[in-house]
Image (tube, helix red, strand yellow):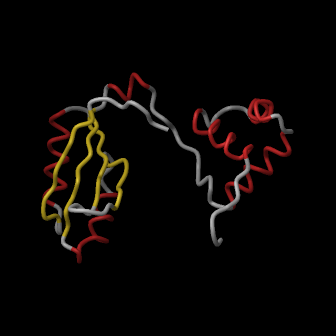
Amino acid sequence: MSGQPNLDEVDVRLLGLLRDDARQPIAQLAKELGISRGQLYSRLARLEESGVVDGYTVRLGDAFARSRLRAHVMIKTAPRFRRELESLLSEIVQVSAIHAISGEFDYIAMLEAEDGVELNRLVDEIGMLEGVEFTRSSVILATKLER
C-alpha cells in the first residue's frame, strides 16, 4: 500500500465509534452512521485491508485500571543494542507499549504493575538489560484522556 488511505466523514465517525466501544453490534453502528449493514461491512473490510484498522482489543475497566500502578520508563541505549533491547522489552508482559522517541532518550516503555514493589522490580530489571545505559521513570498518577 502506498500513501495514506482516503477517509471520508463516515469512516472518521466509524473509527470514533469503534474506539469508544469496538464490541457494538453491526446493526447499532450502521444505525448511528445512517448506512446499511452491508455498507458497514464493506467499510470495515476496506479499513482492515488498508491497515487503518489493525485489530480489535480490550480496554480495561476503570476499577481494574485504577488498581494497577502504571509508569513510563525512558530508556537511553547503546546504539548497537537497540533491536535486541526491543525484543527483550517485548518479552516482559508488564510492558504494555514501547515507543521509539527522539531526544536524549531512545525509548519509552509503558509499564503496568500490581504495586510499587513490582514496579520497582520491573524498573530494576529494565535497567539491568544489556545495552541500557540509563533510565528515568515517572509514575502515572491519573489519566485525563485515553482513546
Q: Position of residue 83 (x, y in %)?
A: 31, 71
Q: Residue at x 18, y 72 (%)?
A: 78
Q: Position of residue 51 (x, y in %)?
A: 62, 60
In the image, residue 103 sits, relative to residue 146, either above or below, namely below
Q: Position of residue 113 (x, y in %)?
A: 26, 37
Q: Residue at x 36, y 31 (%)?
A: 143
Q: 143 or 28: which is nearer to us?
A: 143
In the image, residue 107 sits, relative to residue 93, either above or below, namely below
Q: 117 or 106: which is nearer to us?
A: 106
Can you say which quadrant of the picture contains the N terminus? bottom right
Residue 11 left/right relative to 137: right
Q: Residue at x 45, y 32 (%)?
A: 60
Q: Residue furthest top?
A: 63
Q: Residue at x 77, y 35 (%)?
A: 33
Q: Position of residue 67 (x, y in %)?
A: 31, 26
Can you tell which quarter of the image residue 26 is in? top right
State the count of labels: 0
In the image, residue 49 sits, relative to residue 68, either above or below, namely below
